[in-house]
Amino acid sequence: MPASLYTPAPSAQRTVLALAALLLLGGLAACGGGGKDGPAAASAATAASAAAKAPVELLVSPEDILTVGQAGAAGRGALITGAIVPEKRADVRAELGAVVQQVLKENGDTVQRGDVLVKLDESTVRDSLNAAEESLRAATLSFEQSERQLQRVKSLQAQGMVSQQAAEDAEVRRNNANSDVLAAKARVVNARQQLQRTEVRAPFDGVVVERKVSVGDTVQVGRELLKVMDPRTLRLEGRISADQLREVRVGQSVRFSLNGYGAQRFEGRVQRVDAVANASTRQVEVVVALVGEAPTVAGLFAEGEVLTQAEAAQGKLVLPQGAVQPLEGKQMVWRLGADNKLQRVEVTLGELDPRHGWWPVKTGVQAGDRLLRNPTASLSPGQPFRLGGAGAAVVSAPASGAKAGAQAASAASAQ
């Protein structure tokens, strides 16, 4: 058959081209470096190929590790903000004008009902009491004398020795003396009450939260002296938006966090929903009774949610958004295996809580599993890792094995 009519098959063409390329590379290697450099180039190519296949070890620092745990609440509901305040609280005020002689309790002191908190100057009140008692004594003597005189007049009237008018006048004097006695007794009682008011006492068991006076201060009636609260009656007094009012009902669960308590979550139940919105903010006040563990400090800012959905996720596992990596329509996380190799695990998630950035986990991981907090796209299953010290970061793998091989070959050629 003439040579001009022969056409090789496509596979044969590729084989011929591959052989020609190998011969050309061999000739170039021989021309460029002689026979001595040929083995070096071959070993460099082998090293580059091995480097391309070997996975890069990750250095994982403690802050890159996320331990799967439970959330106090991953539910969604009406946002509530407010403060922790005691239901039982009192502003203890002065009931008479006097000078403060002694302050017996300081901020933070525990008090029992009836304990003396502040003593006021009693000299003026005691003088008034003495005068009232003397007035009562004189009125009592006058009454007794008028009573005896009335009895004598009545005896003489029975004998016909005095007129009816004289008997009636004696009875009027006796009645007036009796009224004077009653008025004197009232003044004595009032003076004794004023004397008792010089000792300001605790209205109930609780804690002194604010002292407003010091020794030597002159106080008037109604002046605030101390604030007392009962820490066992703390509750959340919060506000919700009028747009979410339809979702809130008495008895619903509430979970909230407090400024100063970090990630700790507290629980409560809606106790009362006000019927009137605030005139300035148009928000509605909601009172929440605490359930279970309660804070010990009043006045802290609180923020949480009224759980209006069944997705409360009490005790469920949750993951932050950054730990979940979408891949081909699936949700993946990277688990740190016991064999120091990465494991790509598919997880089934619930509905995202946008307020906290939590994914409720249904399946895939268990409590205590260690995951990468913010995985990158360059990770591969089975990739080895080792734990580094504080401050270390996750080391990303090279972009591709071919690039690593090219770098190794370049280094070998430079030698």
Image (spheres, rainbow, N blue to C red):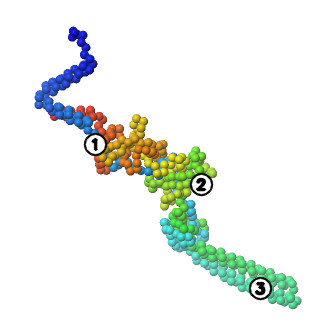
Amino acid tagged 2: Arg
Residue 133, relative to residue 112: is it above or below? Answer: below
Q: Quadrant of residue 119?
A: bottom right
What residue appears at the point 60 percent right and 68 percent down from the top-left corner?
Answer: 221
User: x%, y% of residue 194?
Assistant: 62, 74
Q: Residues within 10 Å of mark 3 (few under 14, many from 20)?
A: some
Q: Residue 272 carries which label?
A: 2
> SS for tag 1?
loop
Q: How far, Cα to Cα, is label 2 from label 3?
A: 63 Å
Q: Quadrant of the N terminus?
A: top left
Q: Which amino acid does label 1 sit on?
A: Glu
Q: Earlier in the sequence, mark 2 or mark 3?
A: 3
Q: Nearer the viewer, residue 381 or 9?
A: 9
Residue that numbered label 1 is attached to: 57
Q: Residue at x 76, y 80 (%)?
A: 176
* Residue 131 picture location, percent across and down: 65, 80
Looking at the image, residue 204 sits to the left or right of residue 6; the answer is right
Q: In this view, does 107 lie above or below 401?
A: below
Q: Can residue 408 be seen in this view?
A: no
Residue type of the residue flagged with mark 3: Glu
Of the image marks 2 and 1, the number of the one nearer the N terminus: 1
Q: Nearer the viewer, mark 2 or mark 3?
A: 2
Q: Give how far across and how far down residue 404 sits, in percent.
A: 25, 35
Q: Earlier in the sequence, mark 3 or mark 1?
A: 1
Q: Identify the residue at image location x=26%, y=32%.
A: 402
Element type at marker 2?
A: strand
Q: In which quarter of the image is residue 142?
A: bottom right
Q: Which of marks 3 and 1 is in front?
A: 1
The residue to which callout 3 is attached is 147
User: What is the C-alpha distance between the residues marked 2 and 1?
Assistant: 58 Å
Q: Which residue is drawn at 52% across and 63% down?
A: 231
Tell me whether circle 2 and circle 1 mark residues in contact (CB < 8 Å): no
